[in-house]
Image (cartoon, grey):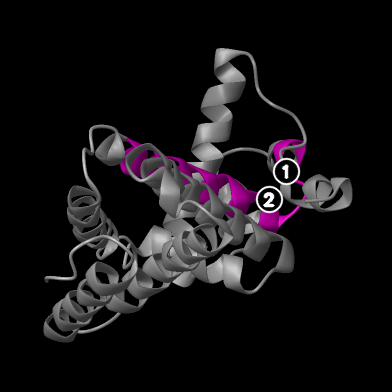
């Protein structure tokens, strides 16, 4: 991502003093509530300042525009997902076990974010801004890297460009499937996730892993 993009979606300054950190947290907490209620497109910086009970200048002191607030909230969710995925893969001992972990990760992801209007609102915000969309794609790449590292450790002979492309594709599609399920009726959502997990078991490590559901 270029410097110009980061200028518009990055923090203008990183708070160091406790008071400044607390003020930034207030702004982000207020933004999360507004996004949960109205979505990203309806959020206004002046409204945000009022909700956070801070001067409008304090909002712009940290965030050059609304997209930077969306990025900050997205980064929080992405960091949680990446850390959870890495932890779940840390003790995997076989490709079959890795498939079980992928499916368990999908269940955790769905249960964690189905009822989270902030996450869904932030994700919708990333879909309407090119710089934020690139962040989402970079997040998929980091999760794919976790998958790829597991394959390298367990079956290094499978590691090639095609395998990385496959893990990258599945990583991005997992997020898309979860978000579709999260806005769908519960019964349909569970059926979609079951079908998606069957596809993963049959295809993700197809060269050497069992395809049993």
| Residue behind mark 1 | 10
When the figure is inspected, residue 112 is found, relative to residue 124, above or below; the finding is: above
- Residue 131 screen position, x and y as percent: 72, 61
Q: Between residues 197 and 136, which one lies in front from this camera angle?
A: 197
Residue stretch rendered in magenta on the structure = 60-86
Q: Which mark is residue 100?
A: none
Out of 55 and 176, give the one closest to the viewer. 176
Q: How many marks?
A: 2
Magenta stretch: residue 80 in it? yes
Question: Percent position (x, y) of residue 50?
Answer: 57, 49
How far across and how far down the image is residue 94, in percent? 22, 44
In the rendered view of the protein, which quadrant contains the C terminus?
bottom left
Whether residue 165 appears in this view of the structure is yes
Horizontal placement of 77 versus 72: left or right?
left
Hey, which quadrant is residue 91 in on the image? top left
Say the numbered circle drawn on residue 68. Answer: 2
């Amino acid at each position: 991502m270029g410097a110009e993009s980061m200028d518009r979606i990055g923090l203008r300054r990183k708070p160091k003093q406790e008071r400044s950190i607390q003020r930034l947290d207030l702004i982000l907490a207020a933004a999360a509530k507004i996004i949960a209620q109205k979505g990203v497109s309806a959020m206004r910086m002046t409204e945000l300042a009022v909700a956070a009970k801070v001067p409008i200048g304090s909002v712009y002191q940290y965030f050059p525009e609304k997209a930077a607030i969306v990025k900050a909230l997205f980064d929080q969710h992405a960091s949680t997902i990446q850390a959870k995925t890495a932890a779940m893969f840390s003790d995997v001992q076989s490709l079959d076990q890795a498939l079980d972990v992928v499916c368990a990760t999908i269940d955790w992801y769905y249960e964690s974010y189905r009822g989270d209007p902030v996450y869904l609102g932030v994700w919708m915000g990333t879909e309407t801004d090119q710089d934020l969309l690139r962040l989402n794609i970079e997040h998929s790449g980091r999760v794919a890297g976790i998958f790829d590292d597991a394959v390298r450790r367990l079956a290094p002979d499978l590691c090639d460009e095609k395998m990385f492309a496959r893990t990258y594709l599945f990583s991005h599609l997992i997020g898309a499937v979860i978000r579709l399920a999260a806005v769908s009726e519960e019964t349909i959502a569970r059926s979609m996730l079951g079908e998606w997990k069957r596809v993963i078991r049959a295809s993700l490590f197809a060269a050497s892993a069992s395809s049993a559901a």
